[in-house]
Image (cartoon, rainbow, N blue to C red):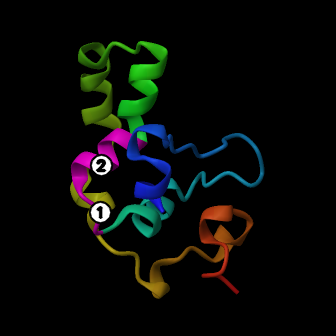
Amino acid sequence: MRHAVGIDKIMWGSDYPHKESSFPFSTEALRLSFAGIDPIEVQQMLGGNAARLFGFDLDGLSEVASRVGPTHEQIGLPLGADEIPPDAGRCPAFAGVTA
């Protein structure tokens, strides 16, 4: 549906600190949602759109992003059913894939 909505209109969020946030399973949630998607589109949805909208300094944030991650390689790995954290069921990102 990302193309129907428009890649340029989507911004990912973890909803931290709310109890339904993906934290501390954000990398797993990202893998579940974005594995196999063009890394350029993923970058746009995970940070590029917000940076453009809010005028973030991407050069200034690049050092933090490279240190904190996750990387495109990590997000691009499909998440196996055996890798879904047992406590992830409270997070909407895992709806329908957890018991």
Which corner quadrant holds the C terminus?
bottom right
For this orientation, the residue located farthest to the right is: 19
State the extent of the magenta-drawn residues as a range. Answer: 36-45
Position of residue 46 measured from the top left corner of the image (x, y, whole percent):
41, 42
Q: For the residue labelled by badge 2, is the local secondary structure a helix, a strand or a loop?
A: helix
Q: Which residue is painted at 63% across and 77% down in the image? A: 86
Disc 2 crowd rating (10 Å Cα; few below 14, some 14-19, many 20+) is some
Residue 49 makes an appearance in the image: yes
Residue 37: give its label: 1
Position of residue 51 measured from the top left corner of the image (x, y, whole percent):
40, 23
Mark 1–mark 2 distance (CA, rounded to whole Å): 7 Å
* Contact check, label 1 and label 2, Cβ < 8 Å: yes
Is residue 61 inside the magenta stretch? Answer: no
Q: Which residue is painted at 67% across and 73% down in the image? A: 95
For this orientation, the residue located farthest to the front is: 4
Q: Is residue 10 left or right of residue 23?
A: left
The rendered magenta stretch, by its main secondary structure, is classed as helix
Position of residue 52 measured from the top left corner of the image (x, y, whole percent):
39, 21
Residue 41: give its label: 2
